[in-house]
Image: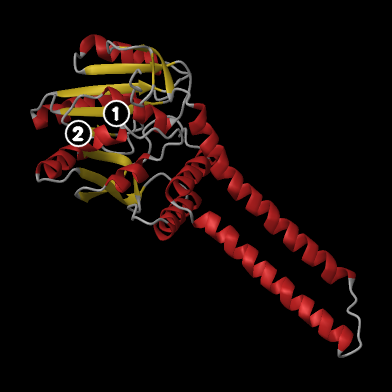
Amino acid sequence: MDLSVVIPVYNEEGNLPNLHERLQKVVQELGVSVELIFVNDGSKDQSMAIIRALKAKDNNVQFINFSRNFGHQIAVSAGLAKSSGDAVVIIDSDLQDPPELIVDLYRKHKEGFEVVYAKRRSRNGESNVKRFISSLFYRLLKLITSHPIPVDTGDFRIIDRKVVDILNQMPEQNKYLRGQISWVGFRQTAVEFDRDERMSGTTGYTYRKMISLALDGITGFSNFPLRAVSISGFLVSGVAFLLMLYALYSKIIKQEVIQGWTSLMLSVLLLGGIQLISVGVIGEYISRINHNVRDRPLYIIEEDTFDEVAVTTNKKEKPSS
């Protein structure tokens, strides 16, 4: 297989026929052997029925049907684990990322790049608030991580088989694939494009899911929050020590007693807030450790077109003793 295309699907019944038609044209233009892997992530509409209909008329179509919604990053991980292409494209099913760009991504990959990601010049159909938050997050993440994660990019990209094999060996439960792909290294480059407006339906990426993904990215690829907690602790302790010296100076030297309920309460509230924030930051890291220690499957497959076990993970099997 020359090329695999992994397509996570969640309530995209209005976009799937158009997406498949445009992908077919891309396949014809490339002239390579292709498999289209649709991963149904617990859709509540007719997405799965449409995928089955596409499979019935196109032998290039494969599908994975989850037992419930496991999340976008997990759906992509399942598609990567099942893929067999020498290169793999990741593209969402909402048609905001144009399938026609796959031709440019594939040709760039053939020039010798193991990773070619699509970089957004513009983002049509999105609110100013969402664009601002996304832009701020990407730049913040780039600033606090030890290795660069490209800004203004999503999961739309093509990756070489060697990169896919490495990703399939990464066992963490809280996936942030664009960070993992950046961490892997190799030769990486970008192809710029203008992101289209959603063709049909509403986005499944709510602000809550965006925050969760942001936390996965920060906790998975940066220790900066933990260091910030430590630094804030030293700073507050230093200020408290200086205030103690000032209080002793006022009492012993100036023979004055510092009074004031307001200053006392502000100090208590400041310290209490810093402590709660510190506990919350540490808790986020511990929570992710807990998820990995449980060693549960990343996803559960109800049905697929691959001849493999229904319940699977992306981890290596431990050799028997």
Task: Measure the C-alpha gap from mark 2 to mark 1.
Answer: 10 Å
Instruction: Report x, y in % for residue 47.
Output: 39, 18
Instruction: Name the kind of residue labelled 2 in the image.
Output: Arg
The residue that mark 2 highlights is 161
Q: What amino acid is found at the position of numbered circle 1 in the picture?
A: Leu
Q: Residue at the spot x=48%, y=19% of the render?
A: 68
Residue 45 percent location from the top left of the image: 45, 18
Residue 22 marker: none
In the rendered view, would you say 249 is above or below 161? below
Q: Quadrant of residue 107?
A: top left
Is residue 87 visible to us here? yes
Model colouring: secondary structure
Query: Where is mark 1, residue-wise?
Result: 80
Q: Is residue 7 above or below residue 113?
A: above
Q: Quadrant of the C terminus?
A: top left
Mark closest to the chain's N terminus, 2 or 1? 1
- Residue sitting nearer the eye, 189 or 187: 187
Element on which disc 2 rests: helix
Q: Residue at x 68, y 67 (%)?
A: 236
The residue lying at 20 percent from left, 14 percent from top is 58
